[in-house]
Amino acid sequence: MQAMTAADVLAELLVQEQRLPARRLLEATLFVPRRAMSQSEIVQRIARDSAEHAVWLADAMTDLGGVSIPYADDATTADMHFQDITFVLPRLRVALEDLVSVYNRAAAFVGDEPHAAETVARILTRHRTHLSELPSSIESEN
């Protein structure tokens, strides 16, 4: 079995980034109660940032001689259409927490490759910020 290179790690991160439910939520029609309006804006920002992360990862991977892996939408997020945003936010939080863990492991692996390490660190910082902005739950109306 061949050892993974930094380009391979970036390719795997690209797949993980594309699986983030926030990307699907940009396309979904969600019910957003008044109390969750600000969370809707956060979700949209996370999704836009994730798309930008995919570009950064693809660029860094290509610079290292890697090849992009074709991607199909994650079927486990297909049920997010027409849901209340307060229902899907916990799923997004868990997905972001998992993604931060993946990036933490990747950062340790690509540390010897400066461009890959910088890309991973930049994205990891953003995801940590997203987690800090995303509420654990939405307060009930009252």
Image (spheres, rainbow, N blue to C red):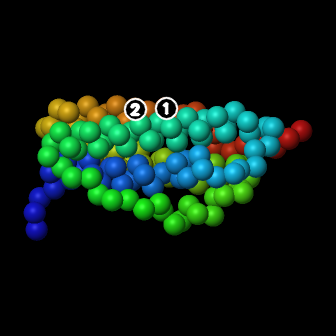
Q: Is residue 111 visible?
A: no
Measure how far apart labels 1 and 2 are at the Cα level.
6 Å
Q: Residue at x 71, y 56 (%)?
A: 83
Residue 64: x %, y % from top left: 15, 42
Q: Secondary structure at mark 2?
A: helix
Pick the quarter of the image with the C terminus. Answer: top right
Which quarter of the figure has residue 39? top right
Q: Which residue is mark 2?
A: 125
In the displayed image of the protein, which residue is found farthest to the right? 142
Above or below for 56 versus 65: above
Q: Which residue is mark 1?
A: 129
In this rendering, would 64 be left or right of 119? left
In this rendering, would 117 be left or right of 49? left
Disc 2: CA contacts within 10 A as few (<14), some (14-19) or many (>=20): few
Disc 1: CA contacts within 10 A as few (<14), some (14-19) or many (>=20): few
Closer-to-camera residue (15/104): 15
Q: Residue at x 43, y 33 (%)?
A: 126
Amino acid type at mark 1 = Thr
Amino acid type at mark 2 = Thr
Q: Secondary structure at mark 1?
A: helix
